[in-house]
Amino acid sequence: MVAGSPSVEATVLGRGVVALVSGEMDYLTGPGLWDQINEVLAGSAGFVVLDLSGVSFCDSAGLNVLLRAAQRAASRDVELVVACVPAALRRILDMTGADQVLQIFDTVVEAEAALGVRGNVAGAGGPGTP
C-alpha cells in the first residue's frame, strides 16, 4: 500500500451514504481512491456526502477524482455533495472553479439537512436548495 493511501469509510444514513475520506488525494493514490468512491456510488444511495475532513493533501489528480465522482453520481441520478473540506483543499476548489461544480457544505450536518435527511425535502425549498 502506498504511504498516505486514502481510505473511504462509508456509513449508510437513511436513503444515502456519508463517506469519510482520509489520507492523501494525489497522482499516486488517485486510482485507488477513485475505485473506493466509485464503489460507494455504485450502491443504491439517493445521495452521497463525501466528508473530506480526513484529507491531508490534494493535488490536481485528487481534484480530478472529485470531479469524476460528481459526473458519475449525476449519471446515476445520485446527489453528491462534499463537506468538511480542509482549508487548503477549499482554496484549490475555489481557485479552479470546482466550487461551482461541487456542492460544498461546512459540516456533514448541514449537508444532511440540505439533502432532506433531517426531515427536509431536497429541492422543495429546504436549506441549501436553490
Image (spheres, rainbow, N blue to C red):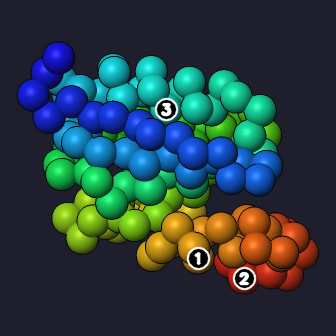
Q: Is residue 15 left or right of residue 24?
A: right
Give me the disc on residue 127: 2
Say above or below: 123 vs 66: below
Q: Position of residue 49 (x, y in %)?
A: 57, 54
Task: Depth check: give the residue in front, 24 or 68.
Answer: 24
Is residue 100 in sight in this rendering?
no
Q: Is residue 102 left or right of residue 125?
A: left
Q: Distance between the Cα atoms at labels 1 and 3?
A: 21 Å
**The disc labelled 2 sits on which kind of residue?**
Pro
User: Which residue is identified by label 1?
Assistant: 110
Give me the disc on residue 37: 3
Say above or below: 22 vs 128: above
Q: Quadrant of the C terminus?
A: bottom right
**The disc labelled 1 sits on which kind of residue?**
Glu
Q: Distance between the Cα atoms at labels 3 and 2?
A: 26 Å
Which is more foreground, mark 1 or mark 2? 1
Which numbered disc flags the more N-terminal residue, 1 or 2? 1
| Residue occupying the point 49% across, 58% down | 82
